Amino acid sequence: MGSFKGHVLPGTLFLVVGAWHVWAAVARFAADPLGFRFRVWNPVGGGALRHLELYVIAGGAFLDMCIEVLYSTHLHFLAPGGGVNPAHLNDLEHGGMLLMFFLFGALALISQNTRYLPLTEGALCLVGATAFTAEFLLFYFHSTTHQGLEGYYHYLLVVLIGLCIASSVLGALLPESFPADLASGLLITLQGLWFYQTAFTLYGSMLPEGCHRDADGHVKCHGHAAGERGEQLANFQLFAYVFLVFVYALGCYAVAAARYGHPDLRTMHATEMERRENGADRGGFVGSSALSREQGVI
């Protein structure tokens, strides 16, 4: 994963699955807001493509795992004197992380297509959280020491992974929560986008001014000011991606409401607007009535 392709491949997987998850969650809520349930995966239609998302997760993770363990190591992952080859420990760690996502996809497929492993949606949420936890531990306790700008980009990635864990656990605890389902899709999408940004910045053509790659491929910045400028640029890039996925979610909601809008959705909206208007008539915000009483006493 310590290369341009090594970040783009998993980034593509997270981006595709996350973007689909956002659309599916919004469409299901617009179609039936009162009967909405959290889903850790979303069917594609009702025919042969129903489990396409799970096949993409399992197949994509397995392909990337084979690249990390077999192709990147050239089958030299064992040292001549015995034990694991330290030069390829990084690849084996990445392979272990990808194995967890492959197991998640495989277990979900077995649960859906057979009667041998019946797992509830809450249980699948926890399995998904376990896969994200393995990813979190990999990037937090990494054998390759990430320092400087390289370390900061991976630190932001760890933050996004931690939020993915929280949203998955929240889905198990709050199975009827639309915000939890939507947040899960948005965070997975953000993680995919950040993998792309990390690839272009650390291994591509978007290296900040004042920084360079040394002979070993590590990013070095000339002085504290250049490193700080690079970190500020990373913060801005992450904000831009947050704004982008927010606009995407709004667009999905607008399209879904127009295509699948259930009458209950309009009723819920009208009730909420009426509640806000009544609240404004009574004082406008929480605590305003108490403030009015204090002024009257004074």
Image: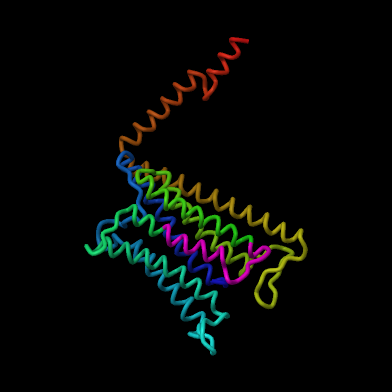
Q: Residue furthest left?
A: 115
Name the spot of residue 131 as percent of width and height, x first.
43, 62
Q: Residue furthest top?
A: 297
Task: Please name the predominant secondary structure of the magenta segment in the image.
Answer: helix
- Is residue 141 rendered magenta in the image? yes
Q: How many marks?
A: 0
Residue range of the region highlighted in magenta in the rendering: 129-151
Q: Residue furthest front?
A: 82
Name the spot of residue 199 as percent of width and height, x first.
58, 66
* Coloring scheme used: rainbow
- Quadrant location of residue 2? bottom right
- The quarter of the rendered structure image containing the C terminus is top right
Q: Residue at x 39, y 32 (%)?
A: 269
- Left or right: 208 in relation to 176: right
**Residue situated in front as seen by the camera: 47 or 222:** 222
Name the spot of residue 172 as percent of width and height, x first.
37, 50
**Residue situated in front as seen by the camera: 129 or 105:** 129
Looking at the image, residue 126 lies above or below residue 74: above
Looking at the image, residue 297 lies above or below residue 231: above
- Left or right: 249 in relation to 149: left
- Is residue 86 rendered magenta in the image? no
Q: Residue at x 44, y 56 (%)?
A: 18
Q: Residue at x 66, y 77 (%)?
A: 216
- Left or right: 162 in relation to 20: right
**Residue situated in front as seen by the camera: 198 or 175:** 175
Looking at the image, residue 177 lies above or below residue 138: above
Name the spot of residue 156 as percent of width and height, x first.
58, 57
Q: Residue at x 35, y 36 (%)?
A: 265
